[in-house]
Amino acid sequence: MEKHRIYSMSVASVYPLYVAKAEKKGRSKAEADEIIAWLTGYDAASLGGQLENNTTFEDFFAQAPRMNPSRSAITGTICGVRVENIEEPTMREIRYLDKLIDELAKGRPMEKILRA
């Protein structure tokens, strides 16, 4: 079975869209970065390195320093698909990130987004 094309896309090509989506709704780049850090364990420097290196989504999640164990609490739909029902692990991680950025853009408080 062929992999989805998102796997080979660079995170750097989508990252500005995540930030723009947040900022368009009055949120900040720092909040988007906080979500990425919470989910993956990347700090500002390591995230910057991944973006500079044009790391693919597949490698970005494979190389993540510490995937948050609470990420399984992320539920709901993204692109019409329930994230908790996605079986392919890398696609589920990508959709978790999409879902968190959507929640940020919808004005949800950070403590709820980060499942605190």
Image (cartoon, rainbow, N blue to C red):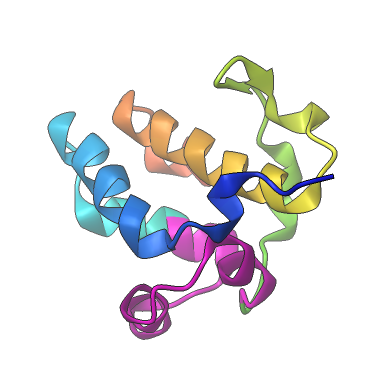
Q: Main secondary structure of the magenta part?
A: helix
Judge from the rendering whether residue 76 lies leftward or rightward of residue 54; answer left or right: right
Tell me the quarter of the picture where residue 22 sits.
top left
Q: Position of residue 14 (x, y in %)?
A: 35, 51
Q: Residue at x 47, y 65 (%)?
A: 37
Magenta stretch: give its range.
36-64
Residue farthest along the top direction in this orientation: 80
How many numbered callouts?
0
Quadrant occupied by the N terminus: top right
Which quarter of the picture shows residue 15?
A: bottom left
Would residue 60 be counted in the magenta stretch? yes
Residue 48 in percent (x, y) is at 32, 78
Residue 72 appears at what percent x and percent y?
Answer: 75, 43
- Left or right of 49 in this view: 85: right
Q: Quadrant of residue 52?
A: bottom left
Q: Is residue 9 above or below residue 81?
A: below
Q: Which one is in front, 89 or 72? A: 89
Residue at position x 52%, y 34% in the image: 99
Q: Residue at x 49, y 75 (%)?
A: 42
Can residue 53 be seen in the rendering of this structure?
Answer: yes
Q: Nearer the viewer, residue 116 or 78?
A: 78
Residue 115, position as x, y percentages in the image:
59, 42
Give whichever of 104, 51 is nearer the camera.
51
Up/down of 96 relative to 67, above or below: above
Mark yes or no: residue 115 visible.
Answer: no
**Residue found at x 76% / y 47%:** 2
Q: Nearer the viewer, residue 77 or 73?
A: 77
Q: Does the magenta run of residues contain 84?
A: no
